Amino acid sequence: MSRRGKKRVNRGDEGRRAGRGEAGRPSGRAGTPGPGLARVEWGVAILLSVIVILLHIGFFTHAGPLWRDEVTSVDFAAMPSMSAIQEALPYDSFPLLSTMLLRGWIAVAGSGDQAVRAWGLVVGIALLGALWVTSRLLGCRTPMIALALFGLNALAIRATGSIRPYGVGMVFIVLALGLLWRAIAAPTRWRFVAAAGAAILSVQCMYPNAFLLFAMCLAGGVVALLAGKRGTAGAVVLVGVAAAASLLPYWPSIQVARGWSALNDSATTLSQLVRMLFEALESGNAVVRAYWIAMVVLSCAIAVSMMRSRTQYPQSPQSQRARADVALFSAIFIVTSVAVFLAALHATHLPTQPWYYIPLMAAIAPALDASVCAITRRTVQRIARVALAILIAMAALGGWRLVLERRTNVDLVASTLEKQAIPGDLILIDPWYLGVTFQRYYHGKTEWTTLPAIEDLRIHRYDLLKRKMASSDPIGPLLEKATRALQSGHRVWLVGGLPQPGANGSPPALPPAPRSIHGWQSRPYLESWGDQAANVLASHAERSERVLAAAPGVSPYENVPIYAISGWR
């Protein structure tokens, strides 16, 4: 054999030995982990994945009818034409991609409750697959930590399986993370094209994904520049620019929507946002929140340690430099995404809910896993990672009952009223947004209205609420209807419940907005209208009977009673 041929053979042997070393033989004092440890890792990851699927199935079978946010998604997607969807776009809080996907699903499977809940189940399983793919792209054999932290989170299960754009948006933002890192680590044109495609799809589902994508591109650009790859850093910037440019067609709708955003204006502090984030992290168990925080700290420590080691030993093996790069990328992304996401929410001046933070958690989870994988090369480290995943999973499963909550009881409310309310009665719904769910499930003949009366309740029409706030007497006609129903011997059915009437009679009505001290804030007006209605009914009605109580095992966000008010005095 020639000398050149021997060199080729020797180089091939060295490459195979290096490959075996990276996959299973760590450098240093520890020996080669046996194949049994790899099987344990796969077994734990597969078991966690099966549990995640079972939880998604549990949500699918127990969530029941759609609550108001889900009804909005379905009604929006099922509008008669694309032009109707375009006209209603300013009234929705999301871009069109997830709506179009849901519209296609409805065209095939129908718009019934179980049919659309099946879409949520499909999305949940797709997100599980995205976690696996991204973890592998980030250098993890199995996504054990990501599955334990995020996959088993009860709130994440509900947010993913709900008929909202969050689930589809999380699928694409998680894939964008893995594809972008793969393009940075081994740059090719088509890898960047794939990363840009996932990035564009992610922001086309959810506007907040743009902030997560900014953090990804910042982290990727920093790592590329530190490695002296200016071309790669430029390509990372182009990925972000392409995603941002894809949102430009929505700018007119965003500007129109700003006309009534002040209705929900809230002086939310940064500490309140952090508390809401902590609630999302907990999954029904405060220990899980501690695991999240500890993992973030550990990720930063790993990045600092590995970069320091890389600086001290510039001739370290390529595999070690690659692990240091992914650790740095993950740490920068984690810290930046949390900071940018919270800053963006704070800038909106809008109240938030725990599920708003689920996309942030979905993107961070595989990055945390990648940080741990970057240092788990020795047998003892890999065993520790398995043990950590099991401990986190055991704590996260403490919130499994939240997955089995019914999302609403308004369908039961509607069914009860169909049986007991008669023509001549009046059904009064307060607050008004409960009417979004009620209009889907009520098919009786008794007249019903919200307080105040909103003409279109297929989706949340804050523009119509704004008009009511600007009018001089928006609930006067409703109170007259209620009075006539009671005087004629009929009943007023109250869905949701009014506040307790004040001792000093009916409070004065607020002047039309924005001439009151509250400007365009809607909450004081809703409270004022409720107070006025409560005092009128309490002053003249003889009896008030609770017909249906808030049901156990139902989400507190839409679990309302029915009161039958009758008699006149």
Image (cartoon, rainbow, N blue to C red):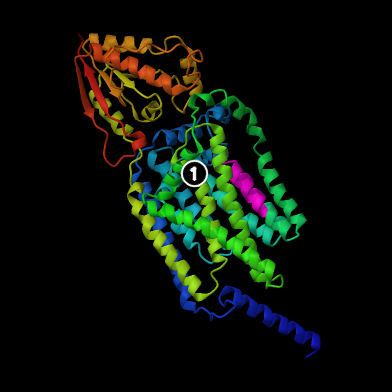
Question: Can you tell which quarter of the image residue 489 is in?
Answer: top left
Instruction: Rate crowding at label 1 as few (under 14), some (14 to 19) or many (20 or more) other CA atoms within 10 Å.
Output: many
Above or below, 487 against 107 in this view is above
| Main SS, magenta residues | helix
Give the image location of residue 274, x and y in percent: 48, 43
Instruction: Judge whether residue 424 can be spotted in this image.
Output: no
Q: x%, y% of residue 45?
A: 45, 64
Q: Which residue: 65% across, 53% down?
A: 219
> Which residue ends up furthest to the bottom in the rendered image?
1
The answer to whether 45 appears left or right of 243 in the picture is left
Quadrant position of residue 538: top left
Q: Name the amino acid, label 1.
A: Tyr
Q: Quadrant of residue 182?
A: bottom right
Q: Which residues are magenta?
A: 194-220
In front: 456, or 284? Answer: 284
Residue under label 1, please give it. Answer: 357
Is 5 above or below relative to 340?
below
Residue 319 shown in magenta: no
The answer to whether residue 491 is left or right of residue 283 is left
Can residue 385 be seen here? The reply is yes
Count of number-bearing discs: 1
Q: Give the SS element for disc 1.
A: helix
- In the rendered structure, the answer to whether residue 565 lies left or right of residue 219 reads left
Q: Which corner quadrant holds the C terminus?
A: top left
> Which residue is located at x 28 percent, y 9 percent?
484
Q: Please provide percent x and percent y for residue 563.
A: 25, 24
Q: Name the quadrant of the N terminus.
A: bottom right
Side of 300 relative to 567 (left or right): right
